[in-house]
Image (spheres, rainbow, N blue to C red):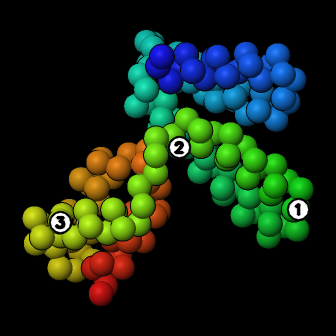
Amino acid sequence: MDLKQTLLSDLKGAMKARESLKLDTLRILSAEIKNREIEVRQDIGDDEILGLVTTQIKRRREAAVLYEKGGRADLKEKEEKEIEILSVYLPQQATDDELRQRIGEIVEETGATSMKDMGKIMKPLAAEFKGKADGSRLKTLVQERLAG
């Protein structure tokens, strides 16, 4: 079963179980998918859906940080629960060790030596770990490697 079908099935399950937070979260994601399909005038594949899920998680992480700064622990907790709900649809996340190893291999292949060469590393790395690692996490690890 593809990701879109899994999402719709989970949406129906949340509706039947009356899980309001999960239902609301999945409805928002479903609407994002539908809007994207209308925009491109065709059904989108799992890769694009993963991109939308990643975007939704990123938005919620940013909101959680802002809620924490604003002293709204209740809303921060809600955002974190929504992140957990959406994370189910992402593939297994890559570990820092896996990422560091691959970064080392790319550095050797490209001959990157300074921060100016960051793009040479980030482009293939981001493509390879799309959905498996957050872009800001990749950036941090690449910067560590190039600085040290």
From the viewer's perspective, is 143 left or right of 134?
left
From the image, tell me which residue sits under label 1.
72
Q: Quadrant of residue 98?
A: bottom left
Q: Is residue 130 visible?
A: yes
Q: Residues within 10 Å of mark 2 (few under 14, many from 20)?
A: many
- Give the CA distance from mark 1 to mark 2: 24 Å
Determine whether 11 is above or below 48 in the image.
Answer: above
Task: Categorize mark 1 by other alpha carbons within 10 Å: few (<14), some (14-19), many (20+).
Answer: few
Q: Nearer the viewer, mark 2 or mark 3?
A: 3
2 or 3: tag closer to the N-terminus: 2
Q: Which mark is residue 54?
A: 2
Secondary structure under the numbered disc 1 in the rendered image: loop
* Nearer-N-terminus badge (1/2): 2
The answer to whether residue 35 is visible is: no
The local secondary structure at tag 3 comes to: helix
Residue 129 lies, in percent from the top left, at 35, 50
**Residue 49 image offset from top left, x and y in percent:** 49, 29
Residue drawn at the location 55% of the way across and 16% of the way down: 5
Q: In this view of the protein, which residue sits in the foreground, 126 or 17?
A: 17
For mark 2, give the secondary structure.
helix
Q: Is residue 48 left or right of residue 121?
A: right
Residue 131 shown left or right of residue 21 in the figure: left
Q: Quadrant of residue 45?
A: top left
Which residue in the structure is indicated by mark 3?
105
Cα separation, mark 3 vs mark 1, equals 43 Å
